[in-house]
Amino acid sequence: MLAVLEELKFFHNWKRPEAGPGRVLIRVMAFGVNRGELLTRQGFSPTVNFSRVLGIECVGIVEEERETRFDPGQKVVATTGGMGRAFDGSYAEYVSVSENNVYPVETKLSWAQLAAIPEVFHTAWGALELSLNIQENETLLVRGGSSAVGMVAADNANQRGLKVISTTRDHKKFSRLKNFGAEYVIVDQGNISSDIRNLVPNSIDKMFYLIGTRVLVDSFGCIRKAGVLCMAGLLGGEWVIDEFAPGAIIPSTTKFTYFSSSSTPMSSEALQSYIMGLEKGIFKNPLSKVFSFEQICDAHTYMETNKACGKIVVTLT
C-alpha cells in the first residue's frame, strides 16, 4: 500500500541530523519546491518510507563537515543524492548531505533567487550538454516549457544560438516564455506534431521533453530522422507506457535518451558560470513565487494549481 500525505505536517522536535564522515551538515536558508516532492506526498513514490522529511535541494551555509573539502560558514547549494527520499531532506532547518552532492558558490543573489537554481540548472544543463549535445543553429523543442527547468533550458539554448520552440497549456504564459528565449510558443493540448511540422518543415533537431510518458508517442512525431529526444521530468504525472513497443513508437534512426540529476553530478564550473551570468543579466532567473517556511502547505497547493510559470521557492530567513 502506498503512503499518502493529504497535507504536510510540521514537527518542532525533529532530531537534528549529523554530518557524518564524508557528509556536510547544511543550515538551510531556502529551497525550491519540486513536482517529485508533490508526487511523493501524494503516494506515487513507493520506495519512500514515511515519516520522511521531503526536499531534494537546498541552498544554505555549511554548519559542520566531516572529512570533506568544505569549511564551516561556506555558502553552498545541494541537489538530490537521495535527499528527501532515502534520507531526510531539505524541508527543515538542517540537512546532512554527501559532499558529492554539495557545490560551493560565490554569489550576491538573495537566498530566494539562489534557491530557484540548483535542481533546475542541474537538470537543464545535463540534458542540453550531456544528453542532447546541443549545437549552434539547431532547432530545439522544449515540451513543458513553462516549468522552471524548461525556461532555464530555453534561456541557455537561446544564448547558445539555437532556435527554440516552447510549449505550454496556458496562453497567459506566452510572453514569459518568449522572454526566456522561445522564438515560438505553442499551446499544448496533447497533440502538437502536426503543428510542429507546419511550423518547422524540416522538423526538430533536438527535443527536451519534460511531460512524462503521457504524450511521448506524439513527441516522437515532432523529431526529424536522426534527431534526439531527451526525457527528464514528470509534469504529466505518468512514467509508464503500457505495452511499450519501441519499433512502433520510436522512428528509425531517432535517438531516445534520458537525464537524471540523481545519478549524474553537476559541473561546479558550469553552475558558477551560470550564476555569474544571472548576476550580469545575461540569463534570466526563473523564480516565480516565494513562500515562507510556515507557508509550505500553501506552496504545495499553489504547485497543484499549475499557475506557476517558473520556480516556487520557500525561504527560512
Image: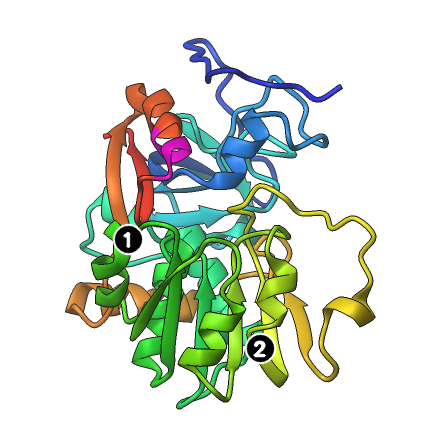
Which amino acid lies under the numbered mark 2 shown in the image of this protein?
Answer: Ile
Can you say whether 31 is above or below 183 in the image?
A: above
Label 1 vs label 2: CA separation? 24 Å
Quadrant in the picture for residue 223 = bottom right
Q: Which mark is residue 171?
A: 1
Question: Which residues make up the magenta segment?
Answer: 302-306
Q: Is residue 196 visible?
A: yes
Q: Is residue 239 shown left or right of residue 170?
A: right
**How many numbered circles are shown?**
2
Colour scheme shown: rainbow
Q: Position of residue 251 (x, y in %)?
A: 71, 77
Residue drawn at x 52%, y 56% is 210
Q: Secondary structure at mark 1?
A: helix
Q: Position of residue 6 (x, y in %)?
A: 51, 15
Mark earlier in primary sequence (1, 2) = 1
Which amino acid lies under the numbered mark 1 shown in the image of this protein?
Answer: His
Q: Look at discs 1 and 2 and give the one toward the viewer.
A: 1
Q: Position of residue 109 (x, y in %)?
A: 20, 53
Q: Is residue 72 shown left or right of residue 112?
A: right
Neighbours of disc 2 within 10 Å: few (<14), some (14-19), many (20+): many
Quadrant (top left, top right, bottom left, bottom right) of the C terminus: top left
Give the residue at mark 2.
223
